Amino acid sequence: MTDIDWGALHDAAREASQYAYVPYSRYRVGAAALVTDGRIIAGCNVENASYGLTLCAECGLVSELHLSGGGQLVAFVCVNGDGETIMPCGRCRQLLYEHAIPGMLLDTVSGVRSIDEVLPDAFGPRDLEGIGR
Ligand code: THU
C-alpha cells in the first residue's frame, strides 16, 4: 500500500479550490484523493443558477477518477477556500463510499477517520447483488 502523503493531498485540494465556480455561495471547496495506483486526483465545486443542481467538489473528483484511469480511493481530504479541512456532506460520503477501498481514510475535522466511521452501516453495491435485473 502506498504511503499517504496528507500534505500533498491538502495541497492538491487547496489548489483545486481555486478553480471552484461559486457565484452563489462564494464558498470554495477543493477535494483531493489518493488512488490505488498512487496518483492524486482532485475536484472543485461547480454551482448552478438552479441552486439544487450544484455539483460538490467530490462529484468532480469521482468523474476525474474514472476519466484518468479508474481505480479506488485510498485516502481523501476536502478543504474550503481558506485551506481549512471540512467534512464531506452526507451525500458525498455515499458517493465516495462506492469508489473507496474498504477502510479508506479521510482527514477530517476530528482527525484521520475511516469511511466506515463517517458513514456507518453504509448502503452500497453489495446490497444490490442478487437482484434480478
Ligand atoms: N460543497 C462541496 O463541494 N462539498 C461538500 O462536501 C460540502 C459542500 C459545496 C457545495 C456548495 O457549492 C458549497 O459547498 C456550499 O454548500
Image (cartoon, helix red, strand yellow):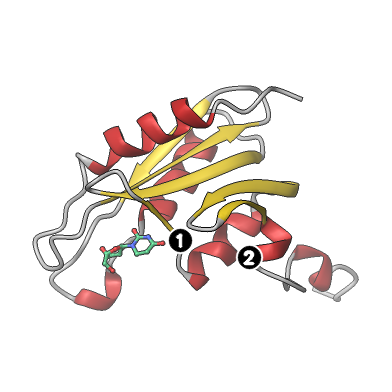
Circle 1 residue: 87
Vertical order, 47 against 20 (above or below): below
Dot 1 and dot 2 residues touching (CB under 8 Å): yes
Quadrant of the image containing the N terminus: top right
First reached walking from the N terminus: tag 1 or tag 2: 1
Question: What amino acid is at disc 2?
Answer: Val
Residue pictured at 66% horizontal, 68% vertical: 119
Q: Which residue is mark 2?
A: 118
Name the amino acid, label 1.
Met
Give x and y (percent) for residue 88: 46, 61
User: Which dot marks residue 51?
Assistant: none
Residue at 13% from the left image edge and 60% from the top image edge: 26
Residue 24 percent across, percent down from the top left: 11, 67
**Quadrant of residue 132 in the image?**
bottom right
Q: Residue furthest left?
A: 23
Dot 1 crowding, Cα within 10 Å, few <14, some 14–19, many 20+: some
Q: Is mark 1 within 8 Å of ligand 1?
A: yes
Could you tell me which residue is drawn at 36 percent across and 48 percent down?
79
**Disc 2 secondary structure class:** helix
* Foreground residue among 6 and 59: 6
Tag 1, which secondary structure?
Answer: loop
Left or right, 31 with respect to 91, comes to left
